[in-house]
Image (cartoon, grey):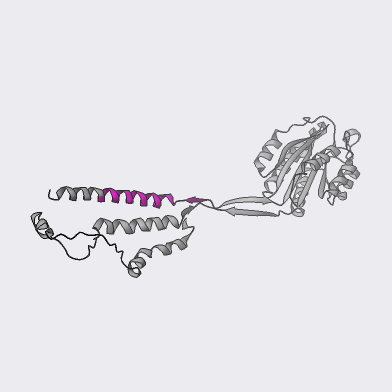
């Protein structure tokens, strides 16, 4: 919409009228020479001498141009501007990292999809996680993947489409065959160092136990608790599995409760969806929406029009003066 930034400047519009009514007229005294034969000279030249003061008369062009120029200058001083539609910016109150296990065991197909076929644990986790991310527009979300080591896949961002896109590009085995739960927590802690969000959350998803961390998970979770980071752990798959695929539910429960979070066990997709629904309820969205409206200044248009009209007026007056001068008798 159109508006004036300094609308109070419009009170200057009637200033010329007030000056004309209240101020005395301009007077100027000029020296003159008296001559006894001035009358005959003027008569010989065909001119008639007037007695008294000379009052300059305004032309019709001056009466028209002067008010318009003044009005345009005052309008420019009032700073007209065009206000654009509002632009909203979300300021997150929570930073959230999702740490996903991409070791070889995540290829196990034991999660049943809604339409029947079995999905791998990673595919089921990715589908549910995508829906969870879409429901969190106010959170800055990052993605950490871990196997033999932990790696940053997506830094904290409000561009959730980028998070989902890079989540789909993630492949099992990219980070090696082992499961480094402690390293994943440690990487998330380091990535939170520059975060100023009042709430910091890590959701860790794995289907095994810690087999290769340089930082023990218990120690990493204690550091997270000291730094105010909350851990939610989700175990995927069969809790009765044996060997390297066994889920260390005791460890996952300990590192979650140590930081004020919770441990969840997901044996099928329905349970996994229910877990994320519960997380969505526990970690309610809290964010501020900042709105501002860009302003485009327009003062240059009335100011330019005033200057152009003034130039045209001076040009016309100069032309008329020259024309009158040429018409005077020699």
- Asked whether, in this view, residue 87 is left or right of residue 142, the answer is left
Quadrant housing residue 24? bottom left
In the rendered structure, which segment of residues is drawn in magenta?
295-317
Q: How many marks?
A: 0
80 is higher (above) or lower (below) than 152: below
- Asked whether, in this view, residue 232 is left or right of residue 5, the answer is right
Closer to the camera, 226 or 41? 41
Does residue 316 belong to the magenta stretch?
yes
What residue sits 75% from the left and 36% below the top?
152
Q: Is residue 118 visible?
A: no
22 is higher (above) or lower (below) than 81: below
Horizontal and vertical percent for residue 173?
79, 30
Q: Residue furthest bottom?
A: 22
Examine the residues drawn in magenta and state their main secondary structure.
helix
Horizontal and vertical percent for residue 166?
69, 36
Closer to the camera, 277 or 6? 6
Q: Is residue 188 visible?
A: yes
Does residue 175 belong to the magenta stretch?
no
203 is higher (above) or lower (below) than 47: above
Closer to the camera, 253 or 314? 314
Closer to the camera, 20 or 271? 20
Quadrant housing residue 238? top right
What residue sits 11% from the left and 59% below the top?
37
Horizontal and vertical percent for residue 269?
77, 43
Horizontal and vertical percent for residue 20?
33, 66
């Amino acid at each position: 919409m159109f508006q004036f930034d300094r609308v109070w400047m419009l009170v200057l519009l009637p200033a010329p009228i007030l000056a004309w009514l209240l101020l005395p007229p301009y007077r100027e005294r000029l020296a003159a020479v008296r001559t006894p034969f001035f009358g005959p000279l003027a008569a010989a030249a065909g001119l008639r001498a007037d007695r008294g003061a000379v009052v300059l008369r305004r032309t019709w062009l001056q009466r028209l141009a002067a008010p318009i120029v003044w009005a345009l200058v005052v309008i420019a001083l009032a700073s007209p501007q065009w206000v654009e539609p509002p632009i909203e910016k979300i300021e997150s109150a929570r930073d959230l990292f999702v740490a996903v296990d991409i070791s070889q065991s995540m290829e196990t197909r034991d999660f049943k999809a809604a339409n029947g076929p079995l999905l791998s644990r990673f595919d089921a986790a990715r589908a549910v996680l995508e829906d969870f991310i879409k429901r969190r527009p106010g959170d800055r979300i990052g993605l950490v993947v871990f196997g033999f080591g932990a790696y940053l896949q997506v830094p904290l961002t409000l561009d959730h489409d980028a998070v989902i896109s890079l989540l789909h590009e993630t492949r099992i085995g990219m980070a090696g065959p082992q499961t480094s739960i402690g390293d994943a927590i440690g990487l998330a802690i380091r990535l939170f160092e520059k975060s100023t969000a009042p709430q910091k959350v890590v959701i860790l998803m794995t289907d095994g136990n810690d087999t290769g961390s340089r930082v023990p998970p218990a120690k990493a979770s204690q550091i997270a608790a000291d730094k105010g980071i909350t851990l939610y752990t989700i175990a995927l798959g069969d809790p009765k599995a044996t060997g390297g695929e066994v889920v260390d539910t005791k460890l996952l429960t300990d590192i979650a409760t140590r930081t004020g979070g919770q441990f969840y066990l997901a044996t099928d997709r329905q349970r996994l969806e229910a877990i994320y629904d519960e997380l969505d309820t526990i970690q309610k969205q809290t964010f501020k929406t900042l709105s501002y409206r860009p302003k485009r200044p327009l003062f240059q248009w009335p100011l330019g029009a005033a200057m152009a009209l003034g130039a045209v007026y001076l040009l016309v007056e100069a032309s008329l003066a020259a024309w009158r001068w040429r018409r005077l008798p020699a």
